[in-house]
Structures are given as C-alpha cells and as structure tokens.
C-alpha cells in the first residue's frame, strides 16, 4: 500500500487527490479501487459506537467530537497492544480505519463538511464577518505558517534529532498545522446559545483557512513530487483561490437555474443539488487545479442566498436534514478514524514528547499573537470583535482531520527522509490530540467565565411569560376535559401530573430596553416566516421577498435595539428620487422618460409596501395577543404599547405610499396590482395541482406537465417590459 501511495504522490502537485492518474493502470488501479472501498462493517461499527457515545455524553460537559476522538484513540490503542485479537470483526474494522487513505477523507468527508457549513451559514451575517474571517484565514494563516516554520528551525538547532529540518520542511509543516477545525467549538457555541455572529465568524474562518492551508501546503509539498515548487507561488495562490471562488459561484448559478425550471420535481431538485456539490469539488480539484474547498464554499453560499428563496419549504427541509445527517455521519467517522490513526501509526520518544509540548505551547502563543496583531482592525470591521470574543477565538483554534490528512500524505511520500515523515506525523497527531483534549474541553468553562454563555435577564423574563401562557392554556383545557361526560371515569390526579411545569418568576433587574429588544426579535422571526408564505401565494415577488428579508437582517444586526419602524432602506426605495422630480419639473419629455424608467421601481415598491403592511398587521395581532395574557408584567405593558406605535407607523407610511402612487402613477399602479393578481391566480392553480397529486387524482408525471405549462404561461406574461397597454 505504501509503495502504491508513494508512486501516486509523485505525479502531481496541486491536485489533492492525485490517485486518478493511476486508475488507468488495471493492476494498480484495481488495488487502489479496492483500498478505497469503505468497509461496511467499519462504517456500521463506527456509527453504532458514535450513537452509544452520543447518548452517554448527554449529561457530560465533554463535546461529542472530543468523545469520538477519545473513543477512536482508545480502541486503536487496544488493537495496537493486541487486546482485540479475539474479536476479528472489530480488529479488521480498526485496521481498515487505521490504514485509511488520505484521499478518502478529502474526497468523501471534506466536501460534506464544507458544503454543510456553507449552506447553513446566514449569508447576511457571513458578508459582514467576511472581512475578519479573511484576515484570519489569509494573512493570519501565512503569518502562522512563517512563525511555526521559524519555531521548527529553532527547535532543530537545539534538538539533534530535528536538525534535518530545513525551511521547506518547516514551511510545509507550518502550512498543514495552521488550518483550524472548530467543529467542537462551534457545536458548543450553539449549545450554549452564544452570539450567532460570533459562531459564524469561527465557522467562516475555518472554511476559508482550510482552503488557504491546503494551497500553501501543496506549494511546499510539491518540492518532493514530480512537479516541484512553483516559480511564482504568490500568483499561483491567488489564481487557485480566486479561481475556486469563481467556479463555485458559477456552478451554483447554473444549478439554481436548472432547479428553478424543474420546480415541480422535488426529487430531481434534491438529487441535482447533492450531486452538484460533489461535482464542484471534483471539477475544481481534479480538472481545473483550483481550490476545491473555496469552490465549495462559494457554491454553498450562493445556493444558500439565491437558491433557498426559490425552493419549496419541503425541498429546503430535505436539504437541511440530508446535509445535517451527512455531516453528523462524516464527523462521527472522521474523528474516530483520526483517533485510530494516531493510536496505530504514531511512534515517539521522550524527546519527541518534550518537543511536542513546546510546539503545542508555540502554536497557541502564535495564535494569540496573530489575533492581537489584527485585533485593532477586526474590532472595527463588520460586527466588530470584543476582547472576550478574541480570547475565545485565540483558545478555540483547534486542529483536526484536515491537518492529520496532510500529515498522512507526507508520511506516504518516501522522497522525504524517514525521520521527517515520522516527526511530521507525530507532531501533527500530538497537536490534534492536545487541542481536542485541552482546548476543546475547557472552552465551555472559559465561555461561562467570560460571561459569553449567560442568558440575558430580559430573555429569561420573556421565556417565563411564554411558558406561563402554555401552563395557563393547558390548565384551562384540562378544566374543559373534566366537564365531558365521556371522560368522567378518568383518574384526573394522574392526568394532572402531565401538566407543564409551572415556572418561577425570575427575580432579577430587567431593563425596559432589553425587554423591547427581545420582543422585537421574536416579532421579526414571525415576520420573516410570513414573507415566505406571501411569496408562495403570489402576493409578493421573489425580489420583494429578498428585499424585505434584507431589511429584517438589518434589524437583526442591531440585536433588536432598532425600532421596528426604522425601515429606511425600504421606504427610501419606495420614495420618488429627487433627480426624477427635477427632470419632470423642467421638461415634459423628461417627465415621460422618467415615468417609463421609474415604472419597474414603482411596481416593486408597491409589492414592498403591500408585503410590509400585511406583515405588520400580523405583528400587531401578535403583540395584542401577547398583551392580553394575564401574566404580562408592568415591564411588558409599557413595552408592548411602544411596539404597537412602531408597527402602526410602518402601516401608515406604507399605506400613504400606495395611495400616492395610485394618484401620481395610475398606469404603473394598475400594472403592479395586475401583476400581483396574475401571480396569485397562478400560485393558486399550482397549489390545486399539488393537492390533486396528493389525492391521487393525477399522476406525478401529469402534475409535472401541468406545472411546466403553468410556468410557460407565467413566462409569457412576465418576459415583456409591460403587458398592460
């Protein structure tokens, strides 16, 4: 196996997979193909062990991924000392995992994890954290690589066993060890309910620095392959990263165009989306020699931003569930494999162990130094970065499967001296082990210590009110049940035990503005879900939905501290630009031209105003329902009154705009209303078709044909500039 991999890694530089060049050889190809086949027993044992472990860790502070790693380390150690000889199935599965090909991780597991992370990201938040994430993942990784390389050169001057390290070896190691894997940290951040903006930053940094780390690693790894080191590494780096981003965005756009045209076939949509994700990675890595990781990030973000609004809720639900399951399986298997590989393959001396401690301390210091250097910029970019968040960011720089995968590639490259190969694998495995067992397990304590995991008192108060209403509703319903003759034989003492637990009022100081912020966020959540319903019913267009959701995103950016009536972007768009007013004043010709130019904007503005009015009326109902509860405290009464005023301002302003355009632009107003009516008519027809299909009145094929015909009618009306003459 080692001989095969040796010949395999000598053929190509940038192509991470490299195995493809050998598949054409029947003898060697068959061996590689058989070695890449996942052992079903290994997979089943791994998933079973993961399920048992997840159940066992429910009441323990240990992160799931750390538990998986420890499990893999344990069973790998048992296998290495010969304790599993009597269990051949388990031993063969562990041996298979221990000899895992690095390409299996890169081609099977990595695309799943990257796409899932990119698809689940909130694109609006990602855009605002992109600057800080890019700072950490490009100049941050480059500086970390250089400083780590200098550290290894320094160690080589004092440790005789490491004197064979030159700058190429050191930079190669610095590149592979600089890629972070925050799976355990992100999971903990979500579990503890910390800021979504901060967890997005951690996730975004990981995705981007994976691509940076791989590209930098390959640039120096190429010195020991057939291609050698590039003559212009900086230009190659830019081309590989930029090319990957462009390719991913382009393929995502093509994918979205296709799934939009087959909107009636949900299974086809799901299949195309899943296959496209893998194809993006393969095409980037195998054929265009650009970064597959960056391409997949671009693909996932584009699909999330442009594709989600065009997909049915059931398709989005399936995609979310599929990738969540796939990511869970990938994480389960990959962390167990990492633990097994370390247990079976890593050899070390006491000197190696001492050097590992030095390197571990060094990379943590380097991480702290980098964040300190860039902190003045990062605290002013995007959402900013607090001192407490920067502390978590420094300590949460975990290393994981990707670094170990690249270390395995080094260990199988026999043109590299054997001591270097062994030391790279040992140090990488050691850093992965220490960051997962020390950093990951203490990050929860650090979050609580810094106050980043505390639930605001206003949120506790709001949660209390909601749960109190649930209790009151259940209690009232129980009284009604007791009045029913058919249930008179019921043992009500037993039934009463199933009432929800009565909450204790949180005795803590609460500021009115904090209560307001929490209620606003809940109103915004309701409003966002309503916009999708309005879009599917044809009341608003897809462009209108995106603009209304963008306005909600701006509200979220202020954590609910911004009044609900502060929708500047929407109302500014709806208002007639001053330059158009001036043109209409000076010339009748310009007035006619301006009216034509402004028509599409009026149509969109009408949709925005109507959608906003409907949403605000529903929000007003929510506030009124909330205020009618007997559990509402004094703090809430004043807050709810202010919120009602904010909501009514939106309704009044939007209504005034519609009245104004109906008077000033009657033709455009008529077309806007007509377009909405057409959308609603076609949407209703589409719903009826789906109902007929579910009832068995028409087949799947007939339903698809009818939906396609409906789409053609839609395009017929909306392809022209205007259809009202």
Image: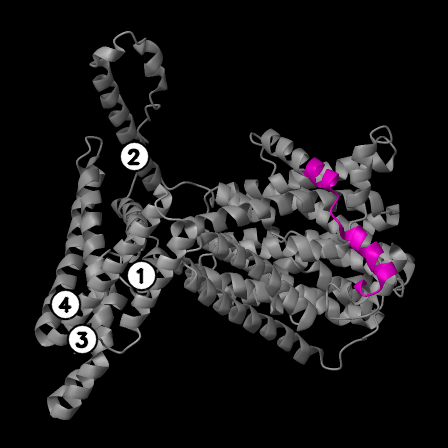
Report which residue position mark 3 lands on.
724
| Residue that label 2 marks | 466
Q: Which residues are magenta?
A: 23-46
Whether residues under marks 3 and 2 lie with C-beta atoms below 8 angstroms apart, the answer is no
Residue 41, image quadrant:
top right
Disc 1 crowd, CA 10 A, few/some/many (<14, 14-19, 20+): many
How crowded is the residue under tag 2: few (<14 C-alpha within 10 Å), some, or many (20+)? some
**What secondary structure is found at the residue carrying circle 4?**
helix
Marks 1 and 2 sit apart, C-alpha to C-alpha, by 29 Å
Q: Residues within 10 Å of mark 4 (few under 14, many from 20)?
A: some
Judging by the rendered image, the residue that carries numbered circle 4 is 657
Residue receiving disc 1 = 545
Name the spot of residue 392 as percent of width and height, x first.
55, 51
- Quadrant of the image for the N terminus? bottom right
- The mark that comes first in sequence, 3 or 1, is 1
Q: Position of residue 184 (x, y in %)?
A: 60, 46
Q: Quadrant of residue 103?
A: bottom right
Label 4 or label 3, whichever lies nearer to me, is: 3
């Amino acid at each position: 196996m080692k001989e095969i991999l040796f010949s395999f890694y000598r053929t190509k530089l940038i192509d991470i997979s490299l195995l493809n060049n050998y598949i054409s050889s029947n003898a060697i190809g068959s061996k590689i193909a058989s070695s890449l086949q996942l052992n079903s027993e290994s997979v089943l044992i791994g998933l079973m062990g993961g399920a048992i472990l997840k159940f066992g860790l429910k009441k323990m502070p240990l992160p799931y991924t750390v538990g998986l790693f420890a499990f893999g380390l344990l069973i790998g150690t048992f296998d290495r000392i010969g304790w599993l000889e009597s269990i051949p199935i388990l031993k063969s599965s562990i041996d298979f995992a221990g000899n895992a090909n690095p390409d299996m991780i890169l081609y099977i597991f990595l695309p799943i994890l990257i796409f899932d992370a990119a698809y689940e990201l909130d694109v609006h938040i990602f855009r605002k954290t992109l600057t800080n994430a890019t700072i950490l993942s490009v100049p941050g990784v480059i500086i970390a690589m250089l400083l780590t390389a200098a550290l290894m050169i320094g160690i080589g001057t004092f440790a005789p066993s490491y004197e064979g390290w030159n700058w190429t070896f050191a930079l190669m190691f610095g590149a592979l060890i600089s890629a972070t894997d925050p799976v355990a940290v992100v999971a903990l951040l979500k579990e503890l309910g910390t800021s979504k903006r901060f967890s997005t930053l951690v996730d975004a940094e990981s995705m981007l620095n994976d691509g940076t780390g791989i590209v930098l690693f390959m640039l120096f790894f190429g010195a020991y392959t057939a291609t050698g080191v590039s003559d212009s590494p900086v230009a190659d780096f830019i081309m590989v990263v930029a090319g990957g981003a462009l390719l991913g965005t382009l393929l995502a756009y093509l994918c979205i165009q296709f799934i939009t045209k087959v909107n009636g076939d949900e299974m086809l949509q799901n299949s195309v989306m899943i296959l496209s994700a893998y194809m993006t990675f393969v095409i980037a890595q195998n054929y265009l020699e650009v970064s597959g990781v960056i391409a997949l990030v671009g693909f996932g973000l584009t699909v999330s931003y442009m594709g989600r609004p065009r997909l049915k809720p059931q398709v989005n639900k399936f995609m979310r569930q599929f990738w969540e399951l796939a990511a869970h399986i990938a994480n389960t298997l990959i962390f167990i494999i990492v633990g097994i590989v370390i247990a079976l393959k890593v050899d070390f001396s006491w000197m190696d162990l001492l050097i590992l401690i030095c390197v571990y301390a060094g990379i943590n210091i380097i991480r702290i130094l980098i964040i300190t250097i860039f902190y003045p910029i990062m605290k002013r970019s995007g959402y900013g970065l607090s001192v407490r968040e920067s502390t978590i960011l420094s300590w949460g720089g975990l290393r994981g499967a990707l670094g170990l995968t690249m270390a395995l590639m080094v260990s199988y490259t026999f043109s590299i001296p054997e001591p270097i190969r062994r030391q790279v694998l040992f140090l990488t495995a050691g850093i992965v082990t220490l960051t997962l067992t020390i950093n990951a397990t203490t990050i929860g304590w650090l979050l609580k210590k810094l106050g980043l995991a505390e639930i605001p008192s206003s949120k506790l108060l709001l949660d209390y009110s909601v749960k109190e209403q649930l209790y009151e509703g259940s209690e009232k319903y129980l009284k009604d049940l007791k009045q029913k003759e058919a249930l008179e034989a019921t043992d009500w003492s037993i039934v009463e035990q199933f009432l929800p637990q009565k909450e204790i009022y949180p005795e803590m100081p609460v500021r009115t503005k904090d209560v307001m912020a929490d209620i606003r966020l809940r109103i915004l959540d309701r409003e966002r879900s309503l916009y999708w319903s309005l879009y599917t019913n044809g009341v608003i267009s897809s462009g209108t939905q995106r603009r209304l959701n963008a306005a909600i995103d701006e509200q979220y950016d202020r954590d609910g501290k911004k009044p609900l009536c502060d929708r500047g972007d929407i109302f500014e768009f709806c208002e007639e630009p001053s330059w158009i007013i001036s043109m209409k004043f000076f010339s009748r010709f310009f007035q006619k031209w301006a009216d034509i130019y402004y028509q599409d904007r009026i149509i969109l503005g009408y949709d925005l105003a109507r959608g906003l009015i409907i949403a605000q009326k529903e929000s007003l109902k929510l506030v009124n329902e909330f205020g009618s509860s007997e559990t509402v405290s004094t703090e809430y009464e004043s807050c709810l009154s202010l919120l009602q005023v904010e909501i009514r301002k939106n309704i009044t302003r939007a209504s005034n705009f519609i009245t104004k355009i109906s008077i000033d632009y009657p033709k455009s107003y008529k077309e806007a209303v007509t377009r909405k009516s057409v959308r609603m008519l076609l949407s209703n027809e589409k719903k009826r078709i789906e109902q007929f299909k579910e009832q068995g009145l028409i087949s799947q094929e007939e339903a698809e044909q009818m939906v396609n015909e409906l789409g053609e009618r839609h395009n017929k009306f909306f392809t022209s500039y205007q259809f009202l003459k």
